[in-house]
């Protein structure tokens, strides 16, 4: 639906003889936001749709045909993956396994090998390449700023065996020790917390509003409604406030990695 909506917006803009920048100026939006909508990567908020209608003199057409609020994206992860590459800040919450951009090659392969229904080796390799490409956002020493909030289950659940777990946890510790990422662990002793029901990614950008991406079994949802994004940010902040401090989290990562090395 997002792609169809974006195509229709582009058609109306071109019919009106407007560039993306001129439409952005008229609608009090950024050009990149217009580009994302036309490409099907974003769905405008109701307020943005009303402004686009006024700028294009289309009555309430863009508002009326706005896709249902918070509709699941058909290829739900693709839009989030593309936006991930543009973010200046990413805050991850992981409930069961290490977030994709922080995974080592062997850990990622172990995760992908458990896909259901099973996929062949060629498809697994293709997905692995995509996942490792995502991790290249960390090649820049500064941007994006990345925070990883990990449930302790991420450290304790063996993925691929002790050696792979030790390597993965050392990788996280190394990134944290050199200041490339900030890691905090939510310990089992905390009990329930506001993020237990989902995996969550929060993203901020230079020239467009922040968004959130949540994922569960066979479903994912890209949220850009300001009130929803803000609520998810508050949930993240509340959970973060109950997590172990960075120094203690790093110590737990290293200690758990050593435990895995001892079991190998």
Image: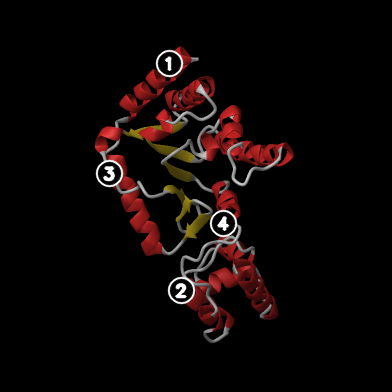
Is there CB contact under 8 Å for labels 4 and 2? no
Q: Which residue is mark 2?
A: 46
Distance from Cα at disc 1 to Cα at disc 2:
51 Å
Distance from Cα at disc 4 to Cα at disc 3:
28 Å
Q: Which mark is residue 258?
A: 1
- Decide if residue 45 is on the left or right side of residue 241: right
- Identify the residue at horizontal 59%, vertical 45% (top origin): 116
Distance from Cα at disc 1 to Cα at disc 4:
37 Å
Is there CB contact under 8 Å for labels 1 and 3? no
- Please tell me whether mark 4 or mark 2 is closer to you in this view: 4
Q: Earlier in the sequence, mark 4 or mark 2?
A: 2
Kindly state the secondary structure of the residue where label 1 is placed. helix
Is there CB contact under 8 Å for labels 1 and 4? no
Q: Is residue 95 above or below residue 42?
A: above
Q: Which residue is mark 3?
A: 192
Count of marks overlaid on the render: 4
Quadrant of residue 112 within the rendered picture: top right
């Amino acid at each position: 639906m997002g792609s169809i909506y974006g195509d229709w917006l582009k058609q109306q803009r071109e019919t009106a003889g407007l560039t993306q920048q001129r439409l952005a100026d008229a609608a009090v939006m950024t050009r990149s936001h217009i580009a994302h909508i036309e490409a099907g990567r974003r769905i405008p908020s109701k307020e943005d749709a009303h402004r686009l209608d006024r700028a294009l003199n289309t009555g309430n057409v863009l508002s009326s045909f706005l896709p249902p609020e918070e509709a699941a994206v058909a290829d739900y992860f693709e839009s989030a993956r593309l936006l991930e590459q543009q973010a200046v800040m990413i805050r991850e919450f992981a409930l069961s396994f290490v977030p994709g951009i922080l995974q080592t090659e062997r850990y990622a392969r172990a995760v992908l090998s458990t896909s259901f229904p099973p996929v062949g080796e060629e498809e697994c390799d293709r997905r692995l390449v995509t996942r490792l490409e995502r991790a290249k956002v960390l090649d820049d020493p500064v941007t994006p700023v990345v925070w990883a909030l990990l449930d302790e289950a991420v450290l304790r659940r063996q993925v691929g065996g002790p050696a792979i777990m030790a390597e993965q946890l050392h990788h996280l510790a190394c990134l944290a020790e050199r200041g490339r990422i900030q890691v905090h662990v939510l310990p089992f002793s905390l009990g329930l917390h506001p993020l237990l029901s989902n995996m969550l990614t929060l993203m901020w950008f230079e020239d467009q509003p922040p968004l959130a991406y949540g994922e569960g079994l066979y479903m994912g949802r890209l949220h850009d409604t300001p009130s929803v994004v803000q609520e998810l940010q508050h949930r993240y902040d509340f959970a973060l406030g109950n997590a172990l401090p960075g120094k203690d989290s790093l110590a737990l990562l290293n200690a758990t990695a050593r435990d895995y090395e001892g079991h190998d």
